[in-house]
Amino acid sequence: MTWNFAKMHGAGNDFIVLDGVRQAIELTPERARALANRHLGIGADQLLLVDTPAHPEADFRYRIFNADGGEVEHCGNGARCFMQFVHEQGLSRRNPLHAEICTGLITLTRLDSGEISVDMGSSQFGPEAVAFNTQDLLSTPCGADTLWSLPLPGHEQAQLSLLAISNPHAVQVVPDVHTATVTLTGPLIESHPRFANRVNAGFMQVIDRNTIKLRVYERGAGETLACGTGACAAAIAGIRRGLLDSPVRVLTRGGALTVAYDNGTTLMSGPAITVFTGEVDIDALTSQFNTKDSSPP
């Protein structure tokens, strides 16, 4: 079975985008892992599946799968690539565009600059929003936010802002993102047993009241060059802590994103780039991947 695909990225956060409107796509976790593998497959942080919607007000439905094959709730960089894909493939020319994700509807708008703005939907705050067990943990008020102290074996406690933008996020402020222990403490936070559904771990450096640098260790994907919902979570956490003012320029390793937050509304804008298009024999790829994956070292 051959699938047509596009390889895309938003600020370095890269995706394999599949058209489920004009071709039959059954994206299993096994197939997702094979496609996303950077050595044996096409390679991507996540896979995006464009499909027909169930919601009457949506133009399309789009689903997000991490490189480990797990399906997730939202992806801001992926949303921009989704709109770019729909326009480039001639599936629709609507602007704005309404997309159905598993937690509701989001609205995407192509700006005069060529960038795409995403209305990221509502945000929820606190431990309940990210399924975090706070038993016997210390908390500290910080502006309109509350910081939770999370012990990490062999490292200092992390002081975390907890919030969800469909996806769960835990954000901490660090002196310098370049020397932050992202690859060491990121996995400890992401898979900490106190987070029932795991979490995206954000490391934010405040440059000035409208600029931050950010690295994110993503749930099910590891550290990525950029994370759209992570950029929004960091900006909102900084605003609630009293450290930032909207709009916030978020500098990631893959590029810059802009987040505007006002009265509960979050708009995130940035680029969406198509790298190449192609086709893949999904059955042959998955078979080869499984054979290689199960072979002895």
Image (cartoon, rainbow, N blue to C red):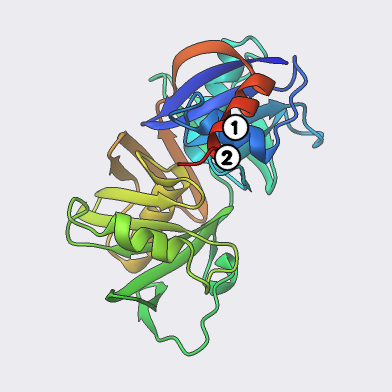
Quarter containing the C terminus: top left
Residue 294 appears anywhere in the view = yes
Label 2 – label 1 distance at C-alpha: 5 Å
Residue drawn 54% across the image and 17% down it: 6
Crowding at mark 2 (Cα within 10 Å: few <14, some 14-19, many 20+): few
Q: Which type of secondary structure does the marked residue at label 1 adopt?
A: helix
Residue drawn 48% across the image and 69% down it: 192
Quarter containing the N terminus: top right
Q: What residue is pinned by disc 2?
A: 294
Q: Residue furthest front?
A: 296
Q: Are marks 2 and 1 in contact (CB under 8 Å)?
A: yes
Q: Position of residue 256 (x, y in %)?
A: 30, 35
The quadrant in which residue 47 appears is top right
Residue 108 appears anywhere in the view = no
Q: Is residue 102 left or right of residue 247?
A: right
Q: Position of residue 167 (x, y in %)?
A: 55, 53
Q: What residue is pinned by disc 1?
A: 291
- The mark tally for this picture is 2
Disc ID at residue 167: none
Q: Is residue 210 above or below residue 77?
A: below
Q: Is residue 219 left or right of residue 87?
A: left
User: Mark 2 is on which residue type?
Assistant: Ser
Q: Nearer the viewer, residue 235 or 189?
A: 189
User: Mark 1 is on which residue type?
Assistant: Thr
Q: Is residue 93 left or right of residue 173?
A: right
Crowding at mark 1 (Cα within 10 Å: few <14, some 14-19, many 20+): few
Q: Residue furthest bottom?
A: 136
The quadrant in which residue 282 appears is top right
Q: Nearer the viewer, residue 61 or 211?
A: 61
Q: Nearer the viewer, residue 37 or 261?
A: 37
